[in-house]
Image (spheres, rainbow, N blue to C red):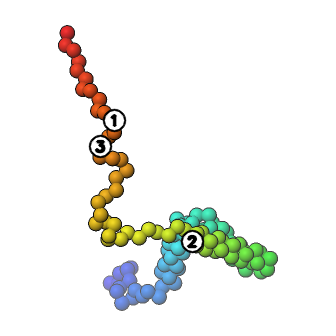
Amino acid sequence: MTSQFPQDSEVTFQNPEYELTMMNALWFRILRTVYRKEPITGFILTAGAMNVAIGGIDQSTSLVIFGLSTVTIALALRWWHLSHRPVPMKVSTESSRRAPMRALPERSSRPSLPTLSIPKD
């Protein structure tokens, strides 16, 4: 009697549907990370890539050129944002050994308030 499920020897990783699923998951992960880091440039980059894809399918040279220029502008904008980020501060071990710097003094310069007493009737 044969079963409907494939045996271990019949399962291969050369399945085109499996490869397509993995490719879609990879593209989804890449797009998700781009949108999380830089949503504006990610949107412009995706729109330009779609223009290139549609122009390539329709054989429209002007749409491909427009898409490529949009992708180039998005990449240049992303590079400009990355190059103008502030330099992260380095924590040295010497500064951690010193006494902590306080924003407020330990004692107030104002006199303390008198304690309140409620008279009993």
Q: Which residue is mark 2?
A: 82
Circle 1: element type: loop
Tell which of 13 and 73 is nearer to you.
73
Compared with 104, 52 (above or below) is below
Would residue 55 appear left or right of 44 to someone viewing this image?
right
**Residue at position x 57%, y 66% from top?**
38
Q: CA distance from mark 2 to mark 1?
A: 48 Å
Q: CA distance from mark 3 to mark 2?
A: 45 Å
**Residue at position x 31%, y 58% from top?**
100
Please identify, in this view, whether the residue under mark 2 or under mark 1 is nearer the observer.
1
Tell which of 78 and 62 is nearer to you.
78
Residue 60 visible somewhere in the drawing: no
Q: Which of the labelled discs sits on residue 110, or is there none? A: 1
Residue 90 visible somewhere in the drawing: yes
Q: Which residue is mark 3?
A: 107
Would residue 92 appear left or right of 19 to someone viewing this image?
left
**Residue at position x 58%, y 69% from top?**
84
Tell which of 6 and 3 is nearer to you.
6
Circle 2: element type: helix
Residue type of the residue flagged with mark 1: Arg
Q: Quadrant of the N terminus?
A: bottom left
Compared with 48, 7 (above or below) is below
